[in-house]
Amino acid sequence: MKKTICLITNWYPTSDNPYQGMFFKEQAFALSDYYDFLVIHYSERNRKKPWQKTTVVLSNKEKNTIEYTVNTWLPLRMVVYDTIENLRHMYTRKGNVEGVGRYLSEKRRKYSKNKITAIFDKYFKDQFDALYCVDAQQEAWFLQCLSEHYRKPYVIGEHAPVPWPGDVLTNANKEAIERADLFFAISYDKIRQLMLLNLRLPRTVYIGNMIDDEKLNIDKEEHSGKTLLIMAAHSFYKNYDMFIRVMERLKQITNYPFRIMIAGYASNKGYAKDIDEFEKRIRASSIFHATEMIPSVPHEQVGKLFNRADAFIMTSIQEGQPVSALEAACCGLPVFATRCGGVEDYVDQTVGRIYAINDIEGMACGLKEFIEGRITFAPEIIREKVIGLFGKRTFVEKFRDFFDSVIDTYQEL
């Protein structure tokens, strides 16, 4: 009999933002022979009107997943309690805890726990065998509350920057992360980020992200010259400033022709920003006439896009385990990336090149050697390496082994 995993997340594709967290849905589908997924989109908002009530809406059923959107509202008095709690800890040495920047008051924690357990008792009681989240610094606290209430295990993951820029870890989430039954690490850099918050990580296993190697293949289109591809939503994380400067510098130092594709820069609603300004900047740059702009790419067409290119470029400041780079490598593309996190786990001299953050000259010179043919890569070797580490079969086996061991341990208690 299949087990059911309750995934609590705010990072999952929706009808109005189909690109957000698409790989989490793909992972759930890949596990369809072994698990069903109850997906809960949960947000706790400040109450603006006194008559606002908690809403639970069935938003989608697909394959082995059923998705609900849950919105609940936070009373103003809880905001006041939290403000007082933060001031108390700010001015008393006794309250200082390294890694914690914001405190949730005991009243807020009790209110939140009662609220979320009441919602689950009404709508989802006994419908799951384990709890899971992919953004621990936001949602681990909810999992801990439900774990204690239902005596079910909870597994955490983290894909976002740690901590989120402009945000801080709360005392509640610090405790919840440390008390989890298992931490799924997508990269070694992510482990480092969490430990820098003075977190004593629970049992930790490296799982990475999944690439669906059944859908992505090497099927190159014939073309002259080299085509360089970057595929990333336009945000400061992706550091398009560096990308443009690298391409302009490359144009200065080589006489070999090359093409540029900038894809997906307008994807992921709410994450991609200042699209018009970005397009204007490209039009005003020295690389514009060699550049093809592709604002959005349907997910089923990304393989075809990768096969139009000869190398994948990533200039990000921070990543978890970037799926686009893995997918490009699965199609045999060498990866030229900054040391942004995750890529260091598999990009060696046979797969591509790694550069220091903001090493514009180094990346430009490396790409010059590539387009002039002084360094070459074997697409089949690149593909074999990433499939061995992150392919669908490997991911499913790791997920099952670790998740089932947690569930079985609880059932034996």
Image (cartoon, grey):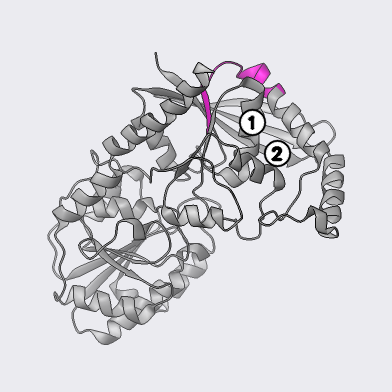
Q: Earlier in the sequence, mark 2 or mark 1?
A: 2
Q: Left or right? Give the position of 224 relative to 387.
A: left
Residue 44's mark?
A: 2
Residue 141's mark?
A: none
**Local SS, label 2:** strand
Quadrant for residue 150, please give it.
top right
**Local SS, label 1:** strand
Where does the image place residue 247, in percent across and percent down from the top left?
33, 76
Gap in angstroms between the C-alphas marked 2 and 1: 9 Å
Kind of residue at badge 2: Glu
Where does the image place residue 48, in percent across and percent down from the top left?
81, 41
The span shown in magenta is 118-132
Residue positioned 16% across, 56% down in the render = 379
Residue 70's mark?
A: 1
Front residue of 291/21: it is 21
Kind of residue at badge 1: Val
Up the image or down, 302 lies above or below 93; here it is above
Residue positioned 25% across, 70% down in the render = 259
Classify 10 Å Cα crowding around label 2: few (below 14), some (14-19), many (20 and above): few
